[in-house]
Image: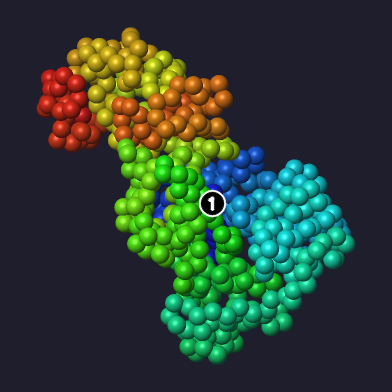
Amino acid sequence: MAQVEYVDADHDHIRFTIEGGKLRKYVNGQRKVGGKVGDGIVTELHFNARSKFLSDQAGWGGVLPLIFLAPLRDLADKASVRHDLNAAVPEQAAGASAKAIQYMDNDEDHICFAVESGQLIKYVNGEKKAGGRVGSGVVTRLRFDSRTKFLSDQAGWGGVLPLIYIAPLRGLADEAGVSHDLPNISLMTRVDYVDTDGDKVAFELKGRQLVKSVNGKTKVGPTGKDPTGVVTRLSFNPRTLRVDDQHGWGGSMPAEAINSLKLLADQAGVQHNIVAIPPMQEVEYMDGDDDIIRMSIEPVGNSMKLVKYVNGVRTCGGGKDRTGVLTELKCDTRARRLDDQYGWGGQTPDLHTLRAIKALADRVGLPHNIPWVPQSGGCYMYTMYHGTSEKVSQAIAREGFRLSGSGQLGAGVYLVDDMNATKAKRFAHDEFYRMSGSLKDGDYPCDAAEYPEHAPRRLGEASSRPVLIECVVTVRKPYLAGGRCDNWHRSHDACWTPRTDCSLSSEWCVRDAGQIRIGHVHSLVNKGCPWGDHCPYEKRTSMPNTPWGGNCPCK
């Protein structure tokens, strides 16, 4: 089965595969297109060469590592999928080569060194780059710090180099005549480990073949299936660290052996989807008690765990657990706290740090309730929703959104992302009462001020029937606020907050209506009240002046 697998910038495990002549997309094991679980059939692929953002026909996607661009383009062509995957990719970066190495550094950049026309060329995320600038990528000098494992080019730019790549990089540098101080380490030809079933597994380079042995006997697949042990394909699950051979036989391996196996597979030209693991990923910040907190992904036993340090000491529960291994993270957005499994923690860090912690937790499968935080760099497309009335939605479809002049985040178009769509449904449900002028509060933006000509006369008519407008919004530079904020417009094109003074859930404010592409309009009539059994039209609730009177507009 032809397929391409990788981990994107949001740390989701993405797989494209051809099944029944169709290109299907899997996200973390589920068939998913447009952010929704379904048949996963891809009909279009769009690629932004500047931001590296790959999206499906519904505008949903993420950053694509450029080393997978060429093989994905081949899959799309085989399945007759419309695409614009035409960005140039170095031949060596598209697959294994005797004159190229590739790995992921500690900054999670995809690095490729290749010998081209007698010169050593450096690629960073698919772009020729030396000295931090896009250009020829020609490397003239390499410096390696054996203590920190930091590898830098002639301009001092670089990152941590996994030790298993020292020998092959030294060979490339010598071939291209590049000055370097890389230590002379013998090229690795074998990796040994004990898997989760207690079997002693070894992969060894023999000539140009990768040979697998289990408990001292060469074999691939179940006993007796293939005693030659020659490996032709390896399938890797980055969440469970399981590696299977071409017969689907294998087990989970220690995290510290993954990069070594990837190097051997590359040298033998074995088809695989093994994703290189950076030496260590970590987040460090100071909490409200002035303690220095560090959370890092580290190998523990046969898997990767998120480990917590407080002022340099491994600990959870205020000293109760000296292993520091986190088994749960609890985030209270109202109290702005982040606690471990023992309820021990401190003030929530800034949103950028919180997003990084969430990414680490997701990578190791750690249970948590940390809210989603949008990316703050590049160009991203989000599915968002705006709740309003049927008549206003018709005006929006004709002329586009009008900017709201008020609200917790200032002027703009107010929307919510797909993880908070219920909030938009409630706004649509309440729109009749807001537009009728009964509720006037600048902290609660509604369409009454922007669309006064469509103010409702009575419940039940088109001006009051609630709808949900589904949109695709392009965001290039969002401002991540911690609550009420109205001074972001000059330097950012959107603002996101996890809470406001009026709501404990997240919302967006988009500066320019031109960033919004209007999609499907969903009627909310006969779909159930978004307030459940506490409809403010019919019952007394915490909302002002309830009950408002009349029947629920969603009935």
Please indicate whether residue 534 sits to the left or right of residue 185 in the image: left
Q: Amino acid at mark 1?
A: Asp
Q: Which image quarter is the C terminus in?
A: top left
In the rendered image, residue 201, in percent from the top left (x then y), is placed at 53, 82
In the rendered image, residue 227, in percent from the top left (x then y), is placed at 56, 89
The reply to whether residue 269 is in sight is no
Q: Residue at x 63, y 58 (%)?
A: 104
Picture quarter containing residue 119?
bottom right
Q: Residue at x 50, y 67 (%)?
A: 299
In the rendered image, residue 58, in percent from the top left (x then y), is placed at 47, 40
Q: Where is mark 1, residue-wise?
A: 8
Q: Which residue lies most toward the top here? A: 453
In the rendered image, residue 524, in percent from the top left (x then y), is placed at 26, 31
Please indicate whether residue 172 sits to the left or right of residue 279 in the image: right
Q: Residue at x 46, y 72 (%)?
A: 301
| Front-lying residue, 199 or 67 | 199
Q: Is residue 551 above or below residue 287?
A: above
